[in-house]
Image (cartoon, rainbow, N blue to C red):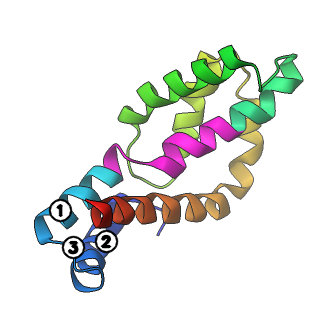
Amino acid sequence: SRSSAATIPLNVEAQITKLNVPPAIANLSASFGATIGQNGCAGIYPAMLAVMVAPTMGINPLDLHFILSLIAIITISSFGIAGVGGGATFAALIVLPAMGLPVTIAALLISIEPLIDMARTALNVSGSMTAGTIA
């Protein structure tokens, strides 16, 4: 699946049966991870795009101000990204203009979006399962 929200039932079941996580924690971590805790779609992907595009605009992506601004914008924008297939594209369309970067790179990656999205969804789901296991 390319949707973090669609994997919630399987996520909860795997946490309870295979990882021995209490049902209440499994339900919380799976649902919270599919909405707000999307480390792949709302965190890593927009940051990766911003770091890739910044040098083309004459911006040093290793500059402390750039990094802190990127972290702040990604943190705020991650709360509004839905756990649906292609949600990371919307996250990138929020982050790139907020950083003063063009969104054309996101348009170039649309053609391979389904391939990238499967890996991001796996990262989102494994992140929420890890959170449930640690809690």
| Residues at marks 3 and 1, CA–CA distance in whole angstroms | 7 Å
Q: Which mark is residue 131?
A: none
For mark 2, what is the residue? Answer: 11
Residues at circles 3 and 1 in contact by the CB criterion of under 8 Å = yes
3D distance between C-alphas at marks 1 and 2: 12 Å
* x and y, in percent, of residue 13 in the image: 24, 79
Residue 17 quadrant: bottom left
Q: Residue at x 82, y 21 (%)?
A: 60
Three-letter residue code for mark 2: Asn
Q: Which of marks 3 and 2 is nearer the N terminus?
A: 2
| Residue 84 placement, left or right of 14 | right
Q: Name the residue under label 3.
A: 21
Q: Give the range drawn in magenta.
A: 34-48
Spot occupied by residue 88 in the image (x, y as percentages of width and height): 54, 44
Q: Name the residue under label 1.
A: 25
Foreground label between 3 and 2? 3
Bin the neighbour count of mark 1 within 10 Å (Cα to Cα): few under 14, some 14-19, many 20 and up.
Answer: some
Secondary structure beneath dot 3 equals loop
Picture layout, residue 36 above or below residue 134: above
Count the marks.
Answer: 3
Circle 1: element type: helix
Q: Which amino acid type is marked by label 1? A: Ile
Q: What residue do we see at 52% from left, 36% from top?
A: 91
Q: Magenta stretch: dominant SS?
A: helix
In the rendered image, residue 120 lying in the magenta stretch gets the answer no
What residue occupies the far bottom of the structure in this picture? Answer: 18
Pointer 2: residues within 10 angstroms few (<14), some, or many (20+)? many
* Rendering coords of residue 114 (x, y %): 62, 61
Three-letter amino acid code of the residue under disc 3? Val
Among the 4 quarters of the image, the one containing residue 101: top right
